[in-house]
Image (cartoon, rainbow, N blue to C red):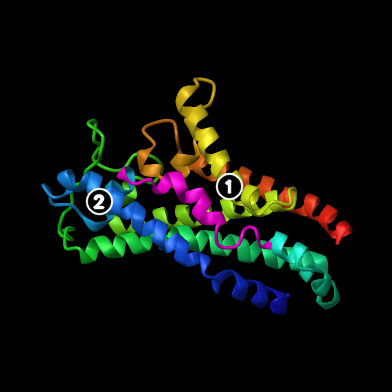
Amino acid sequence: MNGILKVELWRAFHNQRFLIVLALTLACLGVGWYRAEAIVTQQQIHPVNLLMMILSYTPFATLAALLATLPFADSFLDDKNNGFLRFIALRTSYRRYLTAKGLAVGLAGGASIAASLILMLGILILSGKADFSAHNYLSTSTFAPFEPWGPLGWLYSLNPYYYLGFLLISAFLFGGIYALMGLAISTLVNNRYIALAAPLLFFHIFAYLETRSLRLLPAWNPAYALYPFEAIDGFTLANWGGQYALLLFGSTLCIMLLARRARINF
């Protein structure tokens, strides 16, 4: 297991697609900074609060599912089409290969989203626009609360960096689970573009249906899992964990069941 896992992790994190993720992250930050500059330059704002406000104005959530799948989610198709699966069958069991593949895909996707937030925070700090002594929480809403909406908002009042930790955990889970969703799709269809784009389509369909339909609860809005501080009401920690748990279970189950068919065909 250790051998194949090392191979998959090396393949996942030593690829040039992370440069595309980096470029898109910087582009999102630029758009968000341009749109929010008039607001953030007029007030003292903590770095964590500044990151949250900039995120609200960026298209990062629009692209996040794609940024999660882009690094490694379609690698199963590469292994299948290039004959790597036959080589793996001689070296280790198929189950170990799938486990290592899932771990590598999930870690790469999670790292992609979490590292993007860390990068944006670092740039915002270096810009000199943030004020570490600021304590008040500022929201983009006219009904601004004294702390972030959604689950664990009280952590910000306790210490903004505690809440930052929650945001990074949520971002990592988002990236990892949506990357696994892409991997699951790749075991069903032999098209890398569909595998990469399907989680993005899923995200936008459910986000749209939740905002436009009275039949879907806010608990099913995937945008709230990535940006919990924008969940005005009806989204709790149980909803946050339940949404991720269901997506993880569904993706893992599909990988386990559908990958068997791909094995028969190689």
Report which residue position mark 1 lands on: 197
- The magenta span reads 57-75
State yes or no: residue 206 in magenta. no
Q: In this view, does 111 lie to the left or right of 31?
A: right
- The x, y position of residue 50, in whole percent, is 24, 52
Give me the residue at 49% from left, 57% from top.
172
Give me the residue at 45% from left, 35% from top.
235
> Does the rendering let one see residue 145?
yes
Give me the residue at 77% from left, 54% from top.
256
- The x, y position of residue 148, in whole percent, is 31, 43
Tell me where residue 128 sits by quadrant. Answer: bottom left
Tell me where residue 4 sits by quadrant. Answer: bottom right
Report which residue position mark 2 lands on: 33
- The x, y position of residue 219, in whole percent, is 50, 34
Nearer the observer, 78 or 209: 78
Nearer the observer, 66 or 251: 66
Q: Is disc 1 placed on a helix, strand or loop?
A: helix
**Among all residues in the image, which is located at the extreme left?**
42
Give me the residue at 29% from left, 48% from top.
32
Q: Is residue 17 left or right of residue 147?
A: right
The 10 Å Cα crowd at callout 2, few under 14, some 14 to 19, many 20 or more, is many
